[in-house]
Amino acid sequence: MNNENQYRLTGPFREVLTMTDLPLKGALQDQQLHIEKNAGILIKGDRIERIADFELLRSESSYPDLQLTLVEEDTVVIPGMIDVHTHIAFAGTRANDFALRNAGSSYLEIAESGGGIWSTVKDTRAATTDDLVHLILERAAALIRQGITTIEVKSGYGLNVEEELKILRAIKLAAKTCKAKLISTCLAAHTLPKDFEGSHEAYLEILVKELFPVLKEEQLSNRIDAFVEKSAFSKEQIKPYFEAARALGFDITVHADQFSTSGSEVAVSFAARSADHLESSGSAEIELLAASDVIPVALPGASMGIGCAFTPARRLLDAGASLAIATDWNPGSAPMGHLLTQASVLACFEKLSNAEVFAGVTYRAAAALGLSDRGLLSKGAKADFVLFPTDSIKEITYHQGLLAPAQVWIDGAVVFDHN
Ligand code: NIG
Ligand code: FE
């Protein structure tokens, strides 16, 4: 545990990307980025105290007993990244789905013929809580090694009250020992379970009556997600569900416009934190999102996993919307789980500036979770940051995920060191 009053200085870094003083919405240019050269990061407890010239910080007398962590090689630093959309609480594999898709079957056809979400539900139901905790921690460790320091984790492969609770309890248990901050989301409205004898409406009513109160009682999650889609829940079916969630004070997030539109409209009408996917969004949806406070979340890993269009990120930003970028790591549509690779590839196809990519995985992602103390490096922010072994921030996206972090810091402590 770090001594709360001890000042610690690390550096010198060739560049520190602070992501400060940038707007939440709209297009960004690289010239807007604040990059501190030859910088030091001064830490107090688990928070950033100051980012400034390294020699200046070292020589100032106002920091008694300054503890130094010197960096010898060329190194640049970015804020700890935030993955706002993952489904890492699952068991099993869908390698078979992947092969079938690449042989010509569609995601929805595979789901209808026994693969898809339901096959992961069967595997996840067969797993114990301990199995799930282990799987979550293993995947979270892989994300931490990439430089991700806050991870959203959805349930959604239980699809009945008891099994959804098992998954959410596993996420809560994993969060106790995980070095990254885990933020859980209840996605019990992922699809209508095949073994449920009743309507979509009846299933959702049971969740409201029997699952929502336990989420509150056990503090398992304060976020509710739903897959609004022809193959899952329609906007009419989901309305009473989200109304009930809102009335209980849950934050809302939506799997929106993945294969057909209407989800973004639902997200905007419920003032959701975010609308995620949006691969099928057109001009009307883009305008609606841009005029709202909902954060659009691009999931390039799902486009790459399925082989479909990317989220119209450029058009969203140019229309004045915000944009976060997340992995959607799940066994079906997005098995890769590598954020920088996916964000860098999205940048090539959608023509995103480095500023827009870094914003999408840092402070704009934090906003999608309602958090303002991370995703940027300034006084009072969490001391979560990532060191890359290079001399320029530009090298990070250029290498499209292949340039791996040298070190990852969370709450002012090194949690991953490449050496
Ligand atoms: O975000 N679209 C719905 N849910 C996930 C995929 C889930 C699955 O295929 O297992 C997604 O892509
Ligand atoms: Fe998803």
Image: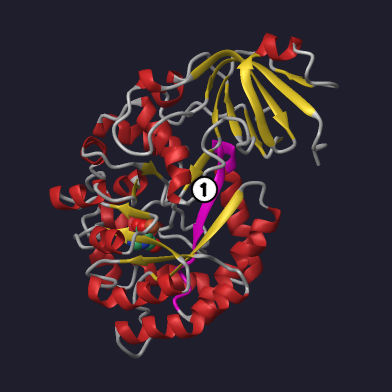
Residue 153 lies within the magenta run: yes
Above/below status of 195 relative to 191: below
In the rendered structure, the answer to whether residue 284 lies left or right of residue 150 reads left
Residue at figure coordinates x 79%, y 14% from the top left: 61
Circle 1 Cα neighbour tier, 10 Å, few/some/many (<14 / 14–19 / ≥20): few
Given residues 76 and 406, the one toward you in this image is 76
Residue 53 in picture, x, y percent from top left: 62, 12
Say if residue 154 shows up in the picture. Answer: yes
Residue 173 in picture, x, y percent from top left: 66, 63
Residue 31 in picture, x, y percent from top left: 36, 18
Residue at figure coordinates x 28%, y 42% from the top left: 321
> Label 1 sits on what residue type?
Leu
Above/below status of 213 relative to 17: below
Indicate if the residue with disc 1 has its beta carbon within 8 Å of ligand 2. Answer: no
In the rendered structure, the answer to whether residue 124 lies left or right of residue 141 reads left
Coloration of the structure image: secondary structure
| Farthest-out residue, bottom | 197
Above/below status of 110 relative to 148: below
Residue at figure coordinates x 44%, y 44% from the top left: 365
Say if residue 72 shows up in the picture. Answer: no
Residue 302 lies within the magenta run: no
- Work out which quarter of the rendered image holds the C terminus and state it: top right
Residue 278 in picture, x, y percent from top left: 26, 52
Above/below status of 159 relative to 32: below
**Quarter of the rendered structure image containing ligand 2:** bottom left
Given residues 289 and 397, the one toward you in this image is 289
Q: Which residues are magenta?
A: 144-159
Please give the residue where the numbered disc 1 appears in the rendered image. 371
